[in-house]
Image (cartoon, grey):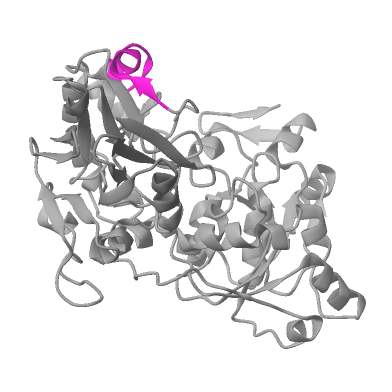
């Protein structure tokens, strides 16, 4: 048996290639949408991908299962959970007819060569969630060596139970989901300690609140050190833990969840954006979304009107996902060496209309020729305190709610930067805003989006950390204090 984890650092997502070397057959679990890289890895290992499976209907990226179905692979999908969250695209193959799909229930098994996969229904993160217990029967094993745990159990965490409510808008879903997650955790705690755990996400994913950065774990380790699993004998304690402190989900999660259920558009080929010239920039339509990947200082001082600040770092593609709609036309301002990866990252969250790209030197040529540009103000703590004292500004805190409650600038409003698109109507149209986060990074994303949407944002240099260091007053949910 061969097992390879194929990891996407930007989305903190793990897919698994599992192959039987005796028969040369392989399967991929929880693939992303650009499936060619999984096929290449299988070929590199001397295997052919005959099947694809997934643990649940994902919310954080577009699944590659439909793409594999188009390529003729057999699909293994959950048939658990309620009718609202069952796959609706299995009879919609592009050429007509249905995909070769096997719907799975708790206790079902299937084989890829000599490798057996046993289905375990583990609801809670989502109603239909399943895990796969993996037994290498070709290697003469009669017990599983590990479990593909999907978004159920991570290293040091469990999948969050609130997404149907907080991201998709299903009112009242999170408490029922948390109770289901508890029952699944009880079942997990009964598994043997030696069982390896291969999760679908690592540190940085918004599918939990405290994921570890280690690629895999064991059942025994999680029983001892995972705060949620340690509460598998304390129902109320478990519910309190998994329902508190979850980060606000990115706006695009709702769209991903629905598309993965109803059928993501079949991707014939990745977009091939054309290179734009300085003259093209003169007539760029306002509705086009320019994703500018240059450093913050460079962007802040000069950028195309309406551009979004989307640095090519660990925040990409999450930031475009929060501020760009699936139907939007996109232009990338990016170094050519990063172009292909940027396009791939965007299509993984359904942003397919990447029509062109601008090299940084092309933008500079345009700017030097007196092309129209904008800038964003960034000011010191002292300047912000003075404006607040004179009643000249509103303060918007774009940190998580839990951060805001622990300490804030008095009178500040709070909208997490990942939820701005969904909550923009809560802000007074066209208002002047001092925007801050913890250190000035998240607020920089928010400032660019707010400026595009007609506000006049100013970034607080150094964020709330600088505010505290300067000895400015801090308000908490319990009491007000001078720090």
Quarter of image, res 367: bottom right
Q: Nearer the viewer, residue 208 or 18?
A: 18
- Considering depth in this image, is 372 or 25 the residue closer to the camera? 25
Q: Residue at x 21, y 42 (%)?
A: 129
Question: How far from the left and from the top, in percent, is residue 45?
Answer: 41, 40
Residue 243 higher or lower than 302, as above or below: above
Residue 308, x across and y down, in percent: 65, 65
Of 322 and 361, which appears nearest the observer?
361
Work out whether residue 415 can be spotted.
no
Say left or right for 82 vs 369.
left
Residue 334 locus on image (x, y percent): 70, 63
Is residue 480 placed above or below 364 in the rendered structure? above
Q: Is residue 85 left or right of residue 302?
A: left
Indicate yes or no whether the magenta region holds residue 225: yes
In what quadrant of the picture does the N terminus appear? top left
All told, the count of numbered labels is 0
Image location (x, y in percent) of residue 185: 22, 25
| Magenta residues, dominant SS class | helix
Q: Nearer the viewer, residue 97 or 355?
A: 97
Q: Is residue 155 left or right of residue 316?
A: left
Q: Residue at x 16, y 28 (%)?
A: 183
From which residue to which does the magenta span run?
216-230
Query: Is 480 on the left-hand or right-hand side of 100?
Result: right
Question: Which of the image's four quarters has the C terminus?
Answer: top right
Q: Residue at x 38, y 58 (%)?
A: 62
Residue 329 showing in the rendered view? yes
Residue drawn at x 34%, y 56% as measured from the top left: 63
Q: Is residue 408 magenta?
A: no
């Amino acid at each position: 048996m061969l097992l390879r984890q194929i990891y996407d650092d930007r989305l903190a997502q793990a897919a698994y290639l599992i192959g039987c070397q005796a028969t040369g057959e392989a399967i991929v679990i929880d693939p992303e949408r650009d499936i060619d890289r999984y096929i290449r890895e299988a070929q590199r290992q001397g295997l052919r991908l005959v099947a694809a499976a997934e643990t649940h209907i994902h919310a954080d990226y577009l699944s590659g299962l439909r793409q594999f179905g188009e390529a003729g692979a057999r699909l293994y999908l959950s048939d658990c959970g309620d009718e609202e969250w069952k796959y609706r695209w299995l009879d919609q193959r592009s050429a007509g007819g249905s995909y070769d799909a096997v719907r799975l229930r708790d206790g079902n098994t299937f084989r890829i060569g000599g490798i057996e996969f046993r289905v375990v229904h583990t609801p809670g993160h989502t109603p239909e969630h399943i895990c796969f217990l993996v037994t290498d029967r070709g290697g003469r094993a009669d017990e599983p060596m590990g479990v593909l745990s999907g978004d159920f159990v991570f290293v040091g965490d469990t999948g969050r139970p609130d997404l149907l409510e907080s991201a998709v808008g299903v009112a009242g879903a999170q408490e029922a989901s948390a109770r289901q997650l508890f029952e699944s955790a009880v079942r997990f705690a009964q598994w043997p300690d030696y069982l390896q755990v291969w999760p679908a996400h690592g540190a940085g994913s918004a599918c939990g609140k405290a994921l570890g950065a280690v690629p895999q774990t064991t059942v025994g380790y999680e029983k001892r050190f995972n705060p949620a699993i340690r509460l598998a004998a304390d129902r109320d304690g478990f519910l309190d833990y998994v329902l508190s402190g979850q980060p606000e989900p990115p706006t695009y999660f709702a769209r991903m969840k629905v598309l993965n259920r109803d059928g993501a558009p079949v991707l014939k080929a990745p977009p091939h954006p054309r290179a734009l010239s300085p003259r093209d920039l003169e007539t760029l339509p306002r509705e086009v979304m320019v994703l500018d990947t240059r450093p913050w200082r460079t962007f802040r001082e000069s950028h195309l009107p309406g551009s979004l600040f989307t640095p090519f770092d660990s925040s990409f593609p999450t930031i475009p996902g929060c501020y760009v709609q699936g139907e939007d036309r996109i232009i990338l301002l990016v170094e050519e060496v990063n172009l292909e990866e940027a396009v791939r990252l965007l299509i993984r969250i359904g942003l397919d209309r990447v029509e062109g790209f601008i090299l940084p030197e092309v933008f500079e040529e345009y700017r030097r020729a007196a092309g129209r540009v904008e800038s964003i103000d960034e000011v010191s703590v002292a300047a912000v305190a003075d404006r607040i004292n004179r009643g000249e500004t509103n303060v918007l805190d774009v940190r998580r709610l839990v951060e805001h409650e622990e300490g804030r600038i008095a009178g500040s409003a709070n909208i997490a930067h990942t939820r701005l698109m969904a909550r923009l109507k809560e802000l007074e149209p066209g208002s002047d805003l001092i925007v801050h986060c913890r250190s000035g990074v998240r607020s920089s994303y928010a400032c660019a989006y707010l400026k595009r949407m007609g506000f006049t944002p100013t970034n607080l240099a150094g964020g709330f950390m600088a505010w505290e260091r300067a000895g400015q007053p801090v308000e908490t949910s319990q009491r007000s204090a001078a720090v």
